[in-house]
Image (tube, rainbow, N blue to C red):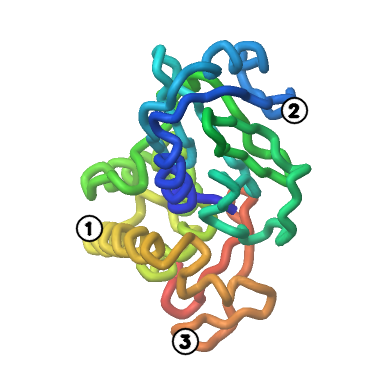
Amino acid sequence: MPEGIEIEYYRREAEKTIARTIVAVEANDHYYLKGQTTTERLQKALVGKQLLKSRRIGKLLLLDVDGGDALGLRFGMTGRIIVDDVAVIESLEYSSKRNNPAWDRFIIKFYGGGSMHIRDPRRLGGVELNPNVSEFGYDLYAITGRELFGVLAGSSRPIKARLMDQSEVAGLGNLLTDEILWRASIDPRRPADSLDQKERRRLYSHFTKTITELTSQGGSHTGNLQDHRVHGGLCPRHGIPLERYRIGGRTTYSCPEHQKR
């Protein structure tokens, strides 16, 4: 599933399309077009134009278009970006390993050849012109310790649910959040505002280190905990069975030894 790290990879890949002139847009899956976006509006906004810049806010990829519009791309659980027939991420956790062009939901073609595809088997992503970005909280790559502490102080919800709230911290998904809390020795079920100063500092330290390390390793699925997030999985630190439960509808794993409530 693409989380903020994967979308950052997509953003870097989308940089290859900057300053190339768009000659055609294929957006025939109307379900994939969000908000007031239509095929006709996309063609008017994009054809004959150039992409100027790629940006990312949390899990949203934004491509600025000359003329003033911004193209917003969301990838849901199974969406991937493919530029010039090359996928920067070849497969995603919990998605099909097949690579079926029939799953292309949105295509941009460029003058002189080349293209950008959004391939999404489950159609949980979407394309939107000029999406509202005010709904997003602090980006996972940019959030400061003070900002994170403010997010925690404002809620008695389980800390995992608070961290995954995109209006508070944009870009954290299930895998990253479990990994960060596991490394920080914090039970995901604890109220967000229950952490003391030492625990908050430890959390922020592991937050930033985990994001940096997993980005360098290739994705959210490369954490130490990931291979053990299965039925009967053992904590890679203590070798004891992990607890498995749900928080906010998301399957959660934690160690009963060093992540005590």
Pair 2/1: label in front = 2
Q: Which residue is mark 1?
A: 197
Indicate which label's residue lies in the foreground, 3 or 2. 2
**Quarter of the figure with residue 95:** bottom right
Q: Is residue 246 above or below residue 213?
A: above
For disc 2, the neighbor class at 10 Å (few under 14, some 14 to 19, many from 20) is some
Mark 3 and mark 2: Cα distance apart in space: 48 Å
Q: Residue at x 40, y 36 (%)?
A: 57
At 45% from the left and 36% from the top, the residue drawn is: 17
Q: Which callout, 2 or 1, points at the residue further toward the start of the chain?
A: 2
- The residue most toward the bottom is 239
Q: Where residue 29 is drawn, which disc sits there?
A: 2
In this rendering, is residue 59 above or below 107? below
In the picture, residue 74 is in which quadrant?
A: top right
Q: Secondary structure at mark 2?
A: loop
Q: Is residue 260 left or right of residue 41?
A: left
Q: Earlier in the sequence, mark 3 or mark 2?
A: 2
Residue, disc 3: 238
Q: Is residue 87 above or below residue 230?
A: above
Name the one closer to the observer, 74 or 11. Answer: 11
Q: Is residue 209 visible?
A: yes
Residue that appears at 44% across and 84% down: 237
Image quadrant holding the C terminus, namely: bottom left
Image coordinates of residue 67 in percent, x first then y, are 41, 12
**Badge 1 element:** helix
Residue 39, percent from left and from top? 67, 17
Residue type pointed to by label 2: Asp
Between tags 1 and 3, which lies in front?
3
Label 3 Cα crowd, 10 Å radius (few <14 / some 14-19 / many 20+): few
Residue occupying image coordinates x 61% and y 42%: 76
